[in-house]
Amino acid sequence: MINEDLIKYIDAQKLRGVSREDISLKLSNVGWKTEDINEGLEKFFPTFTPTSTFTPPEPLKPNLMPKVVGPAGALPIKKIEVSPNLNPSPIQDPRTNSFDNFRPEQKVQPVVTANIMSPGPLPQGAVTASYRKDYQNLETVSGEPKKHWGRFIAVLIIVLLLLGGGGVIFASVKGYINLPFEIPFLKPTPEKAMAKMMSNFSAMKTLHHATDLELSVTVEELNSMKDSTVLDSNNSLDKDLESDKKVAMTNKVKIKTDMDVDFTNPESINLNAVTNGTISIFGGSSINLDSEFRMINKTFYMKIPDIGMINEFAGEPNSWISFNENDLKELLKEQSLVSYDEAKLKKIKTLIEDTKFVESITEVGIETIDNESTRHYQVLVNKEALKNFVSRMIDILNESELNLQKAEILSQMDSIDEIKADIWVVKASFAPKKFTFILSTKDIIIKDSMKVKGKITINSVISKINEKVTVDVPEVSRSMVEIINKSKLKSKDAAIKANLANTRVYAESFYDKTKNSYGKANLDGSCITPAKSSMFENSEAITELLKVTNGVASCYSTSKGYAISVPFASDPTTMLCIDNSGDTIETKIPLTSIVCK
């Protein structure tokens, strides 16, 4: 007999759209009797009969699951034939009290023969997955939801483990924590790390650059070499009273630079650099290189260091000099062995882009710098590629002096012992943190008389990325071109003095050779076309003097005396004058006779 639980189950299945046949099959599989199943189904799937008689349903059976007989776990199988109900009577839907669910197509039910499980004790886990899902729905419909706390807790633990493990992996990749091991599939290749580092470096707006440079060059004279001598490591000249000691000298340059750089405008990079440096040469003599540099809107400014030879050339120490891009082009044209040529520069740029300088990149390990976790990479430079680069560079420049020295330069490059760079990249951001560059050479023999060995080391640390940078224009500065031009004029003035001194020597020699006479008079003052048989005719000393002064000079002579006056290159209104009295004077008065006034 059917009961309330069976009615609720069939009702729930019908609401889900399950057919009468499927519901009947599922109930048969779990041991319900065919007559109970049909009786329950008739309430929701009524069949039509021609008779108008109404047969009331039998009372519902009180139990949902039928009693079973047999040993625990036994599932005997028997064949049951289900006969069609030929006299169904329409039954009202108990929910609507109507005949809305009348289905004429179900007038006759076919005979169904199926193997079903007879009622018996069901072992735990023996119910099929489909019935388990249906039974859960039945429990929900009956108002008694089942709480699966164990499964929920297990899923929660798995989610937490995934989130925690993923978080640890993310933090390790970003460099926030350091694991004692690397995760291979998340570890970047050295090439990818370098590419990301260069991309991030180019995207930086501002940074602080602290650089230490050290250059060491040891020179030995081959004539005095002896095997028992040890090179001096303190920049001093080894001098021993014993003749069997070889002479060796080590010169060093040390420069420390702190530089703030602003890349906000790529077309006009601004920077401020303060340098502290020393040069130790000639057996320990030290020269101070302290200075300051600024770059603002393509104009370069330099504070003159307190070095005698530089002060004589550039002016007072701690004063500022400047030059811009146009000044640099002008200086390259006039001062450099390499002429400024746009076509050559384009070829050089292409050569740099095409040359593969890097031989290999290897990861050294994880290191902490300034409390930041970094990856340490080592880059080896291909020496053959570098040598080929220098060779092609000389060909592009095509300068006669370089062409003559090309074979010797390339031969000396074979003496390079090592070229390498160490780079530290921040794990979290792939930003550059530290650079170290080392170039060392083996012994280089120069013209069989000298042996040279050198090493250059550069260490640079980057910090204060994208912090504010302020670079101010110096209040007073002088143009570098102006200083160079003045220096050229001073050099000409020195040449004028030297040539006038040579001319005095020539005049006295001429006076002795011509028996105490300076020759015929030259009273028009011309040095270019002097009078015949005068001391100025065919004079090599006068010819050299006119080269220095560009042909500007005054020459007067008689048999008893002479005078020569030349304007200074640095100040044409002032003249330097010599005469046979032996005096040399600076004067503003033009020369008109054989006496300087």
Image: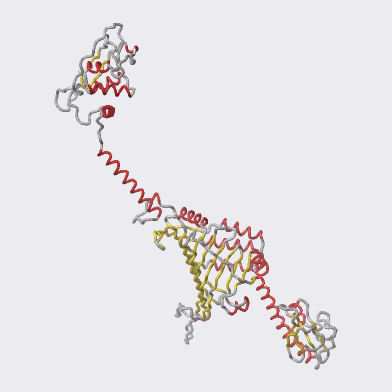
Q: x%, y% of residue 219?
A: 52, 76
Image side of residue 449 versus residue 531, left or right: left
Residue 506 higher or lower than 272, as above or below:
below
- Extreme residue toward the bottom, this view: 516
Image side of residue 406 versus residue 208, left or right: right
Q: Quadrant of residue 446 in the image?
A: bottom right
Colouring method of the image: secondary structure
Residue 42 higher or lower than 480, as above or below:
above
Of 432 and 377, the residue lying toward us: 432
Of 539 and 424, the residue lying toward us: 424
Image side of residue 2 versus residue 480, left or right: left
Q: x%, y% of residue 104?
A: 34, 11
Of 355 and 580, the residue lying toward us: 580
Q: Quadrant of residue 16 in the image?
A: top left
Q: x%, y% of residue 373?
A: 40, 59
Q: Quadrant of the N terminus?
A: top left
- Extreme residue toward the top, this view: 51
Q: Quadrant of the C terminus?
A: bottom right
Q: x%, y% of residue 259?
A: 51, 66
Report how many numbered discs are placed on residues in the image: 0
